[in-house]
Amino acid sequence: MRIACLLIFAVLSLWNSAYAAETPTDLERAWQIYFDTNSHLDPAYTFPHNRCFDRAAAAHGLPKTLLLAVARGESDFEPAARSRANAHGVMQILWPVTARHLGIHRLSELYDPCTNIEAGTRYLKELLKRYDDNLHLALAAYNYGPNRIPPRATEIPSGARWYSGYIYRHLNYVLGDGKARGMKSQVGEHLYSALGQSTLVTFGEPYRAAAFIDRLEASAPDLNLDWFRRDTGKFEVVMSYEGREDFDRHAALLAQAGFRLD
């Protein structure tokens, strides 16, 4: 979607005021609350490769919503996704080191969704064991590598911290941000693949994308926004919507927040 008019916000100052204040302890606590109280909840939508996620979650005893959050953040469920770091598939398994560690010896295997999802789930299970079920640290290691995240670490690299927060945001989307919980009959009935997406703006740094969303949502809390790390190394702010009426509603909310779509 082409941008007709864009008000540039002070994203760097927003990062300093909001994201720098989000300590690892905050994320650890948020992940622990999810693990203890919300991990049993059903996804808000029916996501791609649903049966693959069902089988992997059951086989390794992990919440399906956790796997969906990682997959959405890593590839937005794209089986052919490939990163600049040579990570591949739905769960972005690093080739060749991590793949071979998981018993995958042919690159082509990583492009089979069920194989990739099972491997990523098995890797997460292994990391959770290493980090005593600390999801924050396990996810940091999923992104940064376990050799760079010590067990029981109290300080981790800022990039690993933002990744944990990034996946947590995708988890909230998978769970429906609480909005879908009011009508249980609707939870999981809608196909994620049927939703529309429009890219609003692309940034070169993750904190700029995150702060940009924070500013828009502060003015219009009902917006359905997310940001994705793409294989180009860029970070896209995306608006999701269900049909034309929902698109028009979001466009009006964006306009109220000072951002206009053409």
Image (cartoon, rainbow, N blue to C red):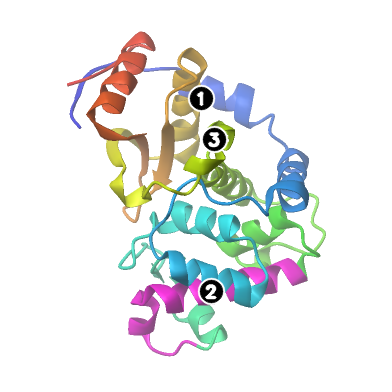
Is disc 2 placed on a helix, strand or loop? helix
**Amino acid, disc 3:** Met
Residue 66: where, in percent of width, then height?
59, 56
113 or 100, nearer to the observer? 113
Residue 9: where, in percent of width, then height?
41, 17
In the rendered structure, which disc, 1 or 3, sits on the residue that comes first in sequence?
3
Residue 183 circle label: 3
Residue 32: where, in percent of width, then height?
76, 49
Q: Which of the 4 quarters of the picture holds residue 14?
A: top right
Residue at position x 51%, y 86% from top? 100
Magenta residues (range):
104-129
Q: Residues within 10 Å of mark 3 (few under 14, many from 20)?
A: few
Q: CA distance from mark 2 to mark 3?
A: 27 Å
Q: Residues within 10 Å of mark 1 (few under 14, many from 20)?
A: some
Is disc 3 placed on a helix, strand or loop? loop
Q: Which residue corresponds to mark 2? A: 55
Which quadrant of the rendered structure holds the C terminus?
top left
Which label lies toward us, 1 or 3? 3
Q: Which residue corresponds to mark 1? A: 214
